[in-house]
Image: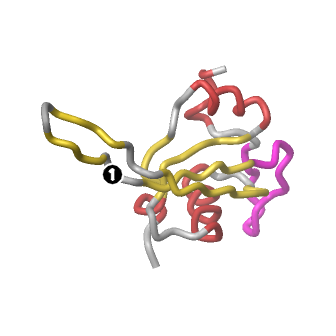
Amino acid sequence: MKAPQDIILKPVITEQSTDQLSQGKYTFKVAKDANKLEIADAVEKLFNVEVTKVNTVNVRGRAKRVGRYLGRTASWKKAVVTVNPEPAPDASGKKRSGTIEFFDGMF
């Protein structure tokens, strides 16, 4: 099984993703071979939150041109994770957070 750091690669910070923060939706770039269950488990372990829903999108690479040469950027996978704002305590009785602290100062 992969480590959570190998599944969640980096946050995606765009205008649309920052608008969704108020709804409890957080956007991440994830490993291409990760499924929704692995993504939800990785986010719960890394950020100590309760995940309610995961939506994934395979993003195609864009065509780029350098001089007369045509190429493509790498394709990647994006995950939009919805977090429960009033989470229940986890199995060990520890209190979970309702937001991800990294994104708190962005909206």
Q: Is residue 60 above or below residue 36?
A: above
For image coordinates 76% across by 51% down, the residue present is 95
Q: Which residues are magenta?
A: 83-97
Q: Is residue 36 above or below residue 82?
A: below
Magenta stretch holds residue 40: no
- 20 to the left or right of 27: right
- Relative image position of residue 36 (x, y in whole percent): 63, 67
Magenta stretch holds residue 90: yes
Front-most of residues 87 and 7: 7
Q: Is residue 101 above or below residue 34?
A: above
Q: Quadrant of the C terminus?
A: top right
- 91 to the left or right of 26: right
Magenta stretch prevailing secondary structure: loop
Front-most of residues 72 and 78: 72
- Relative image position of residue 7 (x, y in whole percent): 46, 62
The residue where tag 1 is placed is: 74
